[in-house]
Amino acid sequence: MDPIPLLQVKHLKKYFPVRKGIFSKRIGWVQAVEEISFHLHSGETLGLVGESGCGKTTVGRCILRLLEPDAGEIWFEGEDLLRMDAESLRKVRARLQIIFQDPYSSLNPRMTAGEIIAEPIRNHTRCSRKEIQDQVSFLMDKVGLHPEQAHRFPHEFSGGQRQRIGIARALALHPRLIICDEPVSALDVSIQAQVINLLVNLQEEMGLSYLFIAHDLSVVEHISDRVAVMYLGKIVELAKDTVLYSSPKHPYTEALLSAVPIPNPKMKKQRILLQGEIPSPINLPKGCRFYSRCSYRMDHCREVDPEFKDLGEGHWVACHLY
Ligand code: SF4
């Protein structure tokens, strides 16, 4: 494994202002991402999992600089992304791509599939028309679409096929890292498996790395090498996938895992139902953010925010039980 990670995120922080009234006076901040740190090696997949609104999509968008972080560092291929000027960032974006959740709204309905896939090649290279056409055909074939479908518009494809167009477009400039932002959440379960298998095969063939964002641990299980679990803007647990699924430490991870179905009708699992109010991200408690829903909570947890501790072998957890 490359000693220098492909991507390093250090102490990333992103707040959004909350405004009110006719003068849009700022009345507070939504603490979307708070002091998040992780790394990703070349060829690796890191799953980033948590409930809606936990900040995982904001992390992905900050890495791509579609959102400007308020603090922290983001290093990609040894370069500081947050200090890059517009031209350097444009060049780096060729190697850093995204696949969006909703394949319909992320594709321009007025462009054909071929034009959508060709657009980044046209914008970033000096390829001739024929070379672009050949690349589009190659990419469509690679993602399991017929090159003859290049003249069709997005609405003429199924949801799974539209996501394949999004994947082909993301691959067009030979990226090293793809941020997969809930790429299968809008698809039927059977299609989800096909798209995940496609991503796994492409990774093996092209040496891609993925930051795979999902709200469900079952989705990232088959694709991730390591998994980070987020809760209200913080990573609460990070471990190798086999370790996290077999021996979760954080009570929130335990609860998420209890909701993952087991493909064996003879085995029964006790589902942990989380009770208690979720704190407002505008007014977070000073202690552990999971306190109000945790069945293991202690008095201490209400007062002191747990540190993110290394339990060894790359297993990190933020909980006073450890
Ligand atoms: Fe539960 Fe306390 Fe651990 Fe928070 S720190 S998850 S409240 S046991």
Image (cartoon, rainbow, N blue to C red):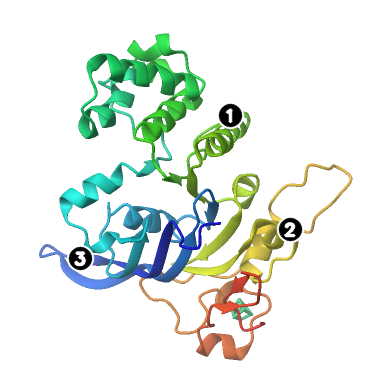
Above/below status of 277 relative to 199: below
Comes first in the chain, label 1 or label 3: 3
- To which residue does mark 2 refer? 271
Give the Cα separation between the discs numbered 2 and 3.
40 Å
Residue 5, percent across and down?
46, 60
**Helix, strand or loop under label 1:** helix
Q: Is residue 273 visible?
A: no
Q: Residues within 10 Å of mark 3 (few under 14, many from 20)?
A: few
Residue furthest to the top = 148
Q: Which mark is residue 20?
A: 3
- Image-quadrant location for residue 105: top left
Comes first in the chain, label 2 or label 3: 3
Q: Residues within 10 Å of mark 2 (few under 14, many from 20)?
A: some
Q: Nearer the viewer, mark 2 or mark 3?
A: 2
Give the Cα separation between the discs numbered 1 and 3.
42 Å
Q: The disc labelled 1 sits on which kind of residue?
A: Ile
Whether pointer 2 and pointer 3 mark residues with C-beta atoms closer than 8 Å, the reply is no
Q: Nearer the viewer, mark 2 or mark 1?
A: 1
Relative side of 130 to 290, left or right = left
Residue at 42% x, 76% y: name it: 284
Observer-nearest of 82 and 35: 82
Q: The disc labelled 2 sits on which kind of residue?
A: Arg
Residue at 43% x, 32% y: name it: 167
- To which residue does mark 1 refer? 191
Assign the C terminus to one quadrant of the image.
Answer: bottom right
Assign the N terminus to one quadrant of the image.
Answer: bottom right
Residue furthest to the right = 266
Q: Is residue 229 visible?
A: yes
Q: Nearer the viewer, mark 1 or mark 3?
A: 1
Above/below status of 79 relative to 129: below
Residue at 41% x, 28% y: name it: 168
Residue at 70% x, 62% y: name it: 243
